[in-house]
Image: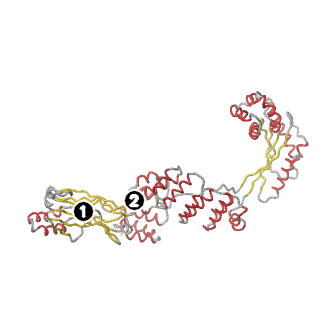
Amino acid sequence: MKRTLRNILAFAVAAFALVSCNNAAKMAELAEQVLITCNPEVLEVVAGNIDADVTVNFPADYFLPKARLTVTPVLKYQGGEVAGAPFEYQGQKVTENYKMVSKDGAAIREHVNFKYVPGMEKSELVARAKVLYKGKTYEYPGEIKIADGANTTYMLVDKNGQFHLMSDNYQEVIPEEVEAQILYLINSATVRPSQLTTADIKDYKAAVADVMNDDRRTILGTDIVAYASPDGPEAKNNVLSQQRETSAEKAFKNVAKNLETGAVNARSIGEDWEGFKELVSASNMQDKDLILRVLSMYSDPNVREREIKNMSSVYKSLADNILPELRRARFITNVEYKNYTPEELTDLVKSNIDVLDEEALLRAATLVKDPAAKQNIYRQAVQKFGSDRARFNSAVEYLNAGDVAAAKNALAGVKSTEGCVTNLKGVVAMREGNYDEAARLFASTECPNAKVNAATLDILNGKYADAVQKLAGSGAKNEGLAYLLAGQLDKAAAAIKGDDAVSAYERAIIAARQGNAAAAQAELRAAGVDRDLAARAANDVEFAKVR
């Protein structure tokens, strides 16, 4: 932005006339050639600072050799003004240590810095000058306007942070099984009558009867699964398993008399190596680790059997205690349990919250709208189950309500070191204005939300290119703003799709920068439903050319 020094030079002519009329006349003649430029032309607030480079171009034969010139940059804004560090210049014959301007002229660049305070969004940068010549000071009565300011678009950044509730494991439909089994003698597929009157069979029949009378449970069907123990020839065992399938299916008809068991599906497994592994793992027998290692090393059933039989010290124990339990057929009735509906959960929270387990409480908290009711549910989950997720979700809800202190207190009790916990701690630090601690926390986790939140810090710190890199394609709230601040208007327009007031305001800025006054005004009207944004727009330098 160019500004002439005609007025200040005219004053200088008057001041210097008694000493050197010829020099003063020459300065007046060249006054229009003295220019001041500012970069940027419109001041911008970046990371809480207003920085600009001001260049004063002195033409040749302008500066009196024995004169000193002090130029003080002043930022004038609504509510006050603040002076920057002065620029000091001297002629060739001045023996002090200021920037010298020779008779050949000079282009001298200066840097100005001001800390932002509210009100500076509508401001102007001016220069005030005074001349010192032969011991006398001559104050210039006017001001030289250098630049307008200041752009505060980055302050539209959403600093709330991105985070999510920890999920519950609540199941609306829970699969259940009612099971019993019958055992066979070695190398036999005959069902002994005693196997149909065992306590296991009696419990099975009683359980199925209970399910039949339970409105929340539905019987889907029954599987009959027959096995052979993994000893002896594999081919023979496969045949034996198939024979047991047939006899077990026939026996089940007697067991299931007067019971609803759904469609029956019978199948043969053959040698029961999985059952063998489970029983050995659960036993206290000697060398069980060695047996399990053999199972992991060999997949061929014949090799497994040979290697296990070679362990003579343990094989007798296997033959007495493990193998007989694998000569069996299982009756497995599949049941579907319908858990509490959303409506039932919300009613139980009010009437009988004690019947809800941890998962049900966590789900119920997401269903109620009242913040106090949510916190009460989380307290119940913490008190009854020591729930880390409830503590975490409580912190999330406090943050959503804007209570950072309460969120920090709730988060302090969380023992989990999951990435989402670290991210939420970073959000708390960011909300508190502790950006260094927030950056450290975001950088220490792979949580996707942390990357988005780190980009928010980049915007606050003026690192717009870094923010774009982190947010590109994320769909995060600040993605469009990052593109806008980086000057990528087309990408910003594509990313800002929200129907909220802030999104409309950002689209208005894009339109204004593109010179589309009509579109800018239309978006500003949409944004004007937010009183704060409406007030901001009145002073926003972004709209200086489209008002």
Q: Residue at x 78, y 53 (%)?
A: 219
Residue at 25%, 58% (x, y): give it.
Answer: 55
Q: Does 465 appear above or below 348?
A: above
Secondary structure under the numbered disc 1 in the rendered image: loop
Q: Is residue 358 above or below residue 333?
A: below
Q: In percent of the image, x 56 and y 62: which residue is there?
A: 407
Q: How many marks?
A: 2
**Nearer-the-camera pick, 382 or 523:** 382
Left or right of 243? Residue 526 is: left
Q: Which residue is mark 1?
A: 2
Q: Say which residue label 2 marks.
A: 47
Residue 77, position as x, y percentages in the image: 33, 69
Can you say which quadrant of the picture contains the C terminus? bottom left
Q: Tell me the element at label 2.
A: loop
Place of residue 513 in the rendered image (x, y in percent of width and height, measured from the top left): 36, 61
Q: How is the image coloured?
A: secondary structure
- 392 horizontally vs 75: left or right: right
Q: Is residue 168 left or right of residue 327?
A: left
Amino acid type of disc 2? Ala
Along the line of sight, which residue is nearer the eye, 536 or 13?
Answer: 13
Q: Amino acid at mark 1?
A: Lys
* Residue mark closest to the camera, 1 vs 2: 2
Q: Are marks 1 and 2 in contact (CB under 8 Å)?
A: no
Q: Is residue 300 above or below residue 36?
A: above
**Screen quadrant of the N terminus:** bottom left
Distance between mark 1 and mark 2 Cα atoms: 27 Å
Tell me which corner region of the image, top left, top right, bottom left or bottom right, holds residue 516.
bottom left
Residue found at the far right of this picture: 193
Crowd band around label 2 with a 10 angstrom C-alpha radius: few (<14), some (14–19), many (20+): some
Q: Mark 1 Cα within 10 Å, few/some/many (few <14, many 20+)? A: some
Q: Quadrant of residue 217?
A: bottom right
Task: Determine whether, in the image, residue 432 is placed left or right of residue 26.
Answer: right
